[in-house]
């Protein structure tokens, strides 16, 4: 916070507070409580069944809210918070046994599915970061043509995600859209994450409650929700990467070694761009093992595996996916983009800060867990390494200075690390919460439960996850399209004699439509605030429904109309209060008008 203040960047100093406060608070809490005896306030087991019964009651309420509401209301987030708290009570207030643990894991998976399907299966077309358009189109091609064609581009060498979704679509024979089949499959995959992290945590700490807490925390962890909702080709790697680490922990077993090899090959073939991230994560774990002088029986990864994974990756790239290899080299050599990834940091710092607040309690628990792991002898070296790695990985997975470096954010996609390290961070967070709760007196225990509820509520209602109806909006687009909007897009695309000039989201949709040649990003001259066209036959499409709530993103051009803009072209958000820009539409004739779309010529 001090460095940005000295350099005059008060917005960055303000944003830094969400990291600085838990950094100051965590060591103080840990030192004050490190000598306290562990304690739990348990409830008579005859009352246990009331809590899962209450969970399923609120689950039904959440489904009713999704069904009856046009957009998810704030009450839905409150119901989700109550559901998560009921699971927490089952973990903290009752003795654990096998049947209860299985029921808690089932509830945790249902909670995660409620949050994922409550977005991507709830709205007409959930788009997240607009990659869903392309992946849905690839599934459609496979279903209708039964072959991988030139439109797959780089995905020609790793189309397994699209083949999986297309196979499900054909076998299930359901009357649903291609993208809904994709979202359904991804939800099933992500429902396995809570049991998976439970197994991993149990192996590391041999403590049932810590493992159950990990399963609960992962069900609302931001990166898990983000990629669970998005259903990208790399989304299943979240599960495969975690299973790989589980297999590596049993490296003394021949069967586990075979599973680790199979998981590695699966990651390479399923989404080959993910394997470098996975290797970097494992390399960090390997280096930490060297620092700690970890015994062989407690090692997570060894040099033999690292060599195998690296050789397998390079061999696949050079012999199967040469185009991708050339693309990656190009990204490394390319100049950094002009536009930073986290533009909201400068446009609306207060809004951005509020949408980061859920990371504060996560970091607090993570720091406590890391301190406890490093200080206590009863914690295994493997668990120490995982907790310390979780703390280190916040640098690349929590919003912070690294995302302001355009080379990292733009060329290297450093923000993707959150997808590959989430389980490491969640395990350390769960251990920290467990440590803090067991050492606390009754008043602080109550405060921790309230803090947990705040964490859940903020995690599911921030604009990164809940752009449909966030508590505080950022300068970004809504992550779903309505049926009326798509009807407007299709009408313009099918009738246009020239380009259909539109905002970023609409253009991304049209890129995968049968009239894709007609799509073009709407260009704005930033000096005189006029729209640019290639000719009088071009249509201008405005999503006025979106504009009432959010800004629209257009291409900036001060050198006249750009017929073939590049991916690095500058884009800018324009709000509804920009009267000079929107008044320029008066010179055109409106030929299409709905509550969501206006089209001009």
Image: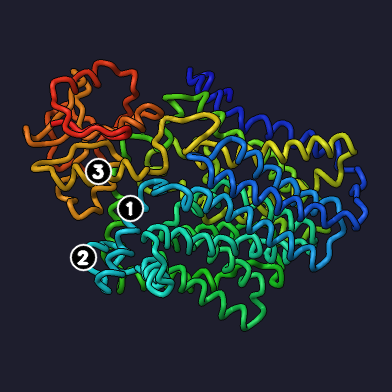
- The residue depicted at 74 percent of the width and 45 percent of the height is 85
- The residue depicted at 79 percent of the width and 57 percent of the height is 209
**Relative to 587, does residue 174 appear above or below in the rendering?**
below
Q: Which residue lies furthest to the bottom in this view?
A: 254
Residue bearing the label numbered 2: 150
Where's residue 520, x and y in %? 19, 41
Where's residue 470, x and y in %? 52, 34
Q: Which of marks 3 and 2 is in front?
A: 3
Front residue of 251/239: it is: 239
Front residue of 39/485: it is: 485
In the rendered structure, the answer to whether residue 37 lies left or right of residue 420 reads right
In the rendered structure, the answer to whether residue 343 lies left or right of residue 397 reads left
Q: Tell me which numbered mark, 3 or 2, is placed earlier along the sequence.
A: 2
Classify 10 Å Cα crowding around label 1: few (below 14), some (14-19), many (20 and above): many
Q: Which of marks 2 and 1 is in front?
A: 1
Viewer can see residue 313:
no
Q: Which disc, if any, is residue 133? A: 1
Secondary element at tag 1: helix
3D distance between C-alphas at marks 3 and 2: 25 Å
Classify 10 Å Cα crowding around label 3: few (below 14), some (14-19), many (20 and above): many
Report the number of discs. 3
Viewer can see residue 299:
yes
Check if mark 3's residue and mark 2's residue have beta carbons within 8 Å. no
Check if mark 1's residue and mark 3's residue have beta carbons within 8 Å. no
Q: Tell me which numbered mark, 1 or 3, is placed earlier along the sequence.
A: 1
Residue bearing the label numbered 3: 489
In the rendered structure, the answer to whether residue 27 lies left or right of residue 193 reads right
Front residue of 474/245: it is: 474
């Amino acid at each position: 916070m001090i460095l940005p203040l000295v350099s005059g960047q008060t917005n960055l100093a303000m944003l830094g507070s969400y990291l600085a406060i838990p950094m100051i608070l965590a060591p103080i809490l840990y030192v004050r409580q490190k000598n306290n005896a562990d304690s739990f306030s348990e409830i008579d087991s005859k009352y246990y069944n009331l809590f899962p019964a209450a969970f399923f009651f609120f689950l039904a309420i959440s489904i009713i809210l999704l069904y009856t509401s046009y957009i998810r209301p704030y009450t839905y987030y409150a119901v989700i918070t109550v559901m998560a708290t009921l699971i927490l009570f089952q973990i903290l207030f009752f003795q654990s046994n096998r049947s209860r643990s299985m029921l808690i894991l089932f509830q945790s998976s249902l909670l995660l599915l409620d949050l994922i399907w409550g977005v991507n299966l709830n709205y007409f077309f959930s788009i997240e970061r607009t990659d869903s358009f392309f992946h849905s189109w690839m599934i459609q091609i496979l279903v209708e043509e039964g072959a991988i064609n030139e439109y797959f581009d780089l995905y020609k060498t790793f189309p397994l995600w699209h083949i999986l979704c297309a196979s499900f679509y054909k076998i299930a024979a359901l009357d649903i859209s291609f993208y809904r089949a994709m979202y359904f499959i991804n939800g099933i995959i992500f429902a396995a994450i809570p049991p998976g992290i439970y197994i991993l945590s149990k192996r590391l700490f041999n403590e049932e409650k810590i493992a159950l807490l990990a399963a609960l925390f992962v069900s609302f962890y931001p990166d898990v929700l983000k990629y669970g909702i998005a259903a990208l080709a790399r989304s299943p790697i979240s599960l495969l990467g975690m299973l790989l680490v589980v297999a590596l922990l049993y490296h003394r077993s021949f069967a586990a070694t075979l599973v680790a090899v199979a998981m590695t090959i699966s990651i390479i073939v399923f989404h080959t761009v993910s394997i470098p991230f996975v290797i970097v994560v494992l390399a960090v774990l390997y280096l930490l093992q060297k620092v700690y002088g970890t015994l062989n029986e407690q090692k997570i990864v060894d040099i033999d595996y690292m060599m195998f994974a690296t050789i397998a990756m390079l061999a696949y790239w050079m012999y199967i996916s040469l185009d991708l290899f050339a693309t990656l080299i190009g990204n490394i050599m390319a100049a950094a983009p002009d536009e930073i990834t986290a533009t909201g940091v400068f446009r609306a710092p207060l809004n951005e800060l509020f949408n980061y607040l859920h990371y504060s309690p996560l970091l607090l628990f993570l720091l406590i867990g890391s301190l406890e792991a490093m200080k206590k002898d009863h914690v295994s070296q493997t668990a120490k390494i995982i907790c310390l790695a979780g703390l280190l990985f916040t640098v690349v997975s929590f919003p912070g200075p690294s995302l302001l470096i355009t080379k990292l954010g733009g060329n290297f996609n450093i923000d993707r690390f959150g997808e590959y390290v989430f389980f490491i961070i969640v395990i350390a967070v769960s251990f920290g919460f467990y440590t803090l709760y067991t050492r606390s007196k009754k008043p602080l225990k109550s405060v921790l439960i309230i803090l947990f509820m705040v964490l859940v509520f903020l995690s599911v209602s921030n604009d990164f996850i809940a752009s449909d109806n966030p508590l505080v909006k950022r300068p970004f687009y809504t992550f779903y399209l309505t049926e009326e909007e798509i009807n407007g897009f299709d009408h313009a695309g099918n009738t246009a004699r020239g380009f259909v000039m539109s905002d970023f989201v609409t253009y991304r949709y049209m890129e995968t439509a049968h009239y894709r040649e007609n799509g073009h990003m709407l260009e704005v001259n930033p000096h005189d605030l006029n729209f640019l066209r290639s000719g009088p036959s071009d249509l201008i499409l405005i999503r006025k429904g979106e504009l009432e709530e959010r800004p629209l993103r257009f291409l900036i051009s001060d050198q006249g109309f750009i017929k073939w803009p590049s991916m690095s072209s500058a884009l800018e958000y324009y709000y509804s209060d920009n009267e000079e820009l929107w008044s320029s539409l008066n010179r055109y004739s409106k030929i299409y008008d709905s509550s969501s779309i206006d089209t001009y010529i």
